[in-house]
Amino acid sequence: MESNKEESWFEKGELLIYDQKECRVIAEYERTVCVEFTDYPFAGEEEEYPYPRVILLKNEVTRPS
């Protein structure tokens, strides 16, 4: 029996960067990843980042170098 599940790009808990902010992987889906910011809330950026967890496209996040 063959599985149609795609291979994961990320591991749960993995550290990523989005918009120069650190975040950790909560869950991964087919084209998106759910992340939680590590140093939330961001002073002065409450309107741009109203929630500590967001869903992002996989190509919007990078691994720290």
Image: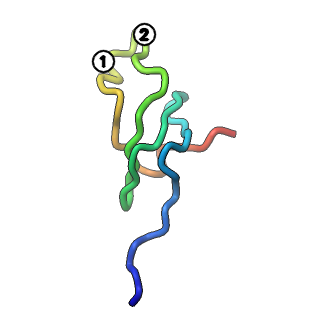
**Amino acid on which disc 2 is placed:** Ala
Left or right of 49 in this view: 61: right
Count of marks overlaid on the render: 2
Q: Which residue is mark 1?
A: 47
Label placed on residue 43: 2
Residue placed at 50% from the left, 43% from the top? 13
Q: Quadrant of the N terminus?
A: bottom left
Residue placed at 41% from the left, 39% from the top? 35
Residue 60, position in %: x, y? 47, 44
- Mark 2 is surrounded, within 10 Å at the Cα level, by few (under 14), some (14 to 19) or many (20 or more) other residues, namely few
Residue 5, position in %: x, y? 39, 73
Residue placed at 39% from the left, 49% from the top? 27
Left or right of 2 in this view: 50: left
Examine the image and state in which quarter residue 30 appears.
bottom left
Q: Quadrant of the C terminus?
A: top right
Residue placed at 40% from the left, 43% from the top? 26
SS category of the residue bearing label 1: loop
- Mark 1 is surrounded, within 10 Å at the Cα level, by few (under 14), some (14 to 19) or many (20 or more) other residues, namely few
Residue sitting at the far top: 44
Q: Nearer the viewer, mark 1 or mark 2?
A: 2
